[in-house]
Every structure is written in structure tokens, then in C-alpha cells.
Amino acid sequence: MVKKAILIGINYPGTEGELLGCIDDVKQMHKSLVELFGFSEENITELIDTDKSKIQPTGKNIRQALSGLVGSAKSGDVLCVHYSGHGTRLPPETGEDDDTEFDECIVPSDNNYITDDEIIEIVSKVPKDCSFTFVSDSCHSGGLIDSAKEQIGESFKKKPKKEFKFPFGLTSINMLKRGTGRDDIEVGNIRTTIFDVFGEDATPKVKKFMKTEVMSKKEVYAGASNGGLENECVLLSGCQTDQTSADVGSKGQAYGAFTNSIQIILGETKGKINYKELVLKSRKLLEKQGYSQRPGLYCSDSYVNVPFIC
């Protein structure tokens, strides 16, 4: 058995959407994996945007890291991914069929969005009997792997809102404009802009959309024939699909509220806690601290009471 992890932290320095705590989240998670869960340093890969000596968390690099993590895994391995950064929701465009009305996405440092469909497709290739834990401290993260059963959460118990609003006002649009050098971006042409700028490095969902061969989520799920999505993947989300995740503190001492809650609980329990207990305790702690976000747990029934990560 080998334990491997990909840790992604994006602070977006110098942009309108700059965050403060994502890199610190990666450092804290790295420490916990080594000290509490027995991960070797050589099996932990960090992608952060505040240190040029590290692999930069661009869309292409994140895709390659995730695909490499899953592709090199063998039965019995333990895989962990932690993401701290912006999350957003792309509205549907003409000709697109989407069950949830939105594509939940994570936002790489170069704004080359990675959609929920793409994450699902990668996770579907996890080998049998190989565990995969995805912790996402980002806005709208409850929908990132929405084929996994919702064990704790409210993301799929209510109809999606028809209207679209960016999670942080016009920040998403402005970050895209600055990152791509395009001033003509608006809600109706986000996907076409991403394709124009990133081409073959764009998310497959965008490429399929541009070729008018739009693939619905049901088709993506059907491709996961080995049952990997249902049986092997566990998603811990910092909030529900219609919520945002808090970035707290100031330069020098900052963190994501969800990640911080996890670290507090892991410290108190020495890492001896199952998925369900961890998410429930995180919910209570965040509520006590005054945050409205409600973390979620998405996995098969067989993983609910399994020890966190290992």
C-alpha cells in the first residue's frame, strides 16, 4: 500500500480575487498527512502560486497532477487531494444540457477552469479497492463530485436556482479578463473565451461544447463502468453548492475556515476520526464560530464510518 497526496493552494496574488489563507491550508494539511497519517514527504506533491520553485497550479498542471495520481495508483493505495482556492459556477449556455443548471468548477491560477464533469471523469478511473479522498475548501464545492451519494448536505435536496450570480460579484469576470487579456468576456461567452485562450488545454467540457457535441453528466457517469465513483471516492466539501467558503485572517496568519476546522478536530482526535464524525464536528465548530457555510460529505454508504483518509 502506498499513500500519495496532491495539495493545491491558490492565493491569486495581485488579482482582484486575491485570497490569503490557501497556501497556509496546504502547509497545515501537509503537516497532518505526515504526522498523523504516515504519508512520506516524497509522495506529497504541492501546487502553489506564491513560490515559483513549486509546480504552478494552472489548469493544465492540476489536470496532469490529478491524472498522474490516479493513473499511477494500484489496488490498496490511499490517495488524497486537498484543494484550497476559488470555486465558481458556470451558467448553462445555448445548446448545453446540464442536470444541475450549472457547472461547478475550481479556479486554477490561470483561470483555465476545471469543471465538475472533468473531476468526475478523472475520479472514475481510480482503481478498485483504492481509496480517494478529496477535500475541497472552495465556494460551491458541494457539487464537485455530484455522482457520489450525498450523506451530509443539502446540495441536492432542493431545485437549483434558475438565475445566475457569480460567487464574488464581478470578481470572476474581472479575473478572467485580466488572466486572459480579453475585455469582451460576459456570462454568455465564458466557454468560448476559455477555448479561444487555452485551446486543447481547456477542460474537455468546453472542447466538447465548442464542437457542439455536448456531453451530459449522465453520459459521463455511464463512462464510470467500474463503479469507482460510487465505491471509491469520498468528497468533503467546505460548503454546499449555493454557498461560499470563508477565507479568514490577514497576511502572515490566514486560513480557510473549513480547512482550519478540520485541522482543529484532527489535532483534538489525533486523527482518529471517521468521515461522518469529522464533517459533523466541522459543521458544529463553524456554526459556533459564526460562519454560515455548511460542509458536506459525499460518498457511498460503505465509506461513511470509515476512518478519515486511512
Image (cartoon, rainbow, N blue to C red):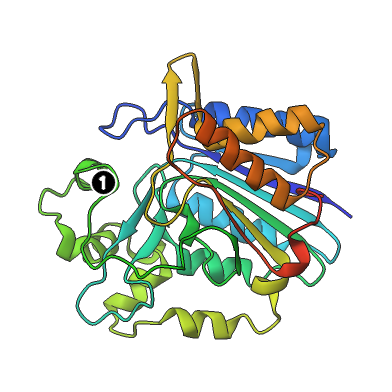
State whether residue 64 is above or below residue 150: above
**Residue 253 appears in the rendering:** yes
Which residue lies at the image location 76% right of the left edge and 49% below the top edge? 309
- Which quadrant is the N terminus positioned in? bottom right
Q: Is residue 299 left or right of residue 40?
A: left
Residue at the farthest left position? 184
For disc 1, the neighbor class at 10 Å (few under 14, some 14 to 19, many from 20) is some
Q: Nearer the viewer, residue 277 or 118?
A: 277
Q: Residue at x 27, y 57 (%)?
A: 197
Q: In the rendered structure, which amino acid carries the disc numbered 1? A: Ser
Residue identified by numbered label 1:
172
- Report the residue that reaches farthest toward the right: 1
* Foreground of the two, 119 or 259: 259
The answer to which quarter of the image holds residue 226 is bottom right
Tag 1 secondary structure: helix
- Residue drawn at (55%, 68%) of the image: 120
Between 87 and 69, which is closer to the camera in this rendering? 87
- Where residue 199 sits in the image (x, y, percent)? 32, 64
Quarter residue 45 falls in = top right
- Where residue 20 appears, as percent x and y from the top left, is 43, 25
- Residue 200 in the image, given as x and y percentages of width and height: 38, 66
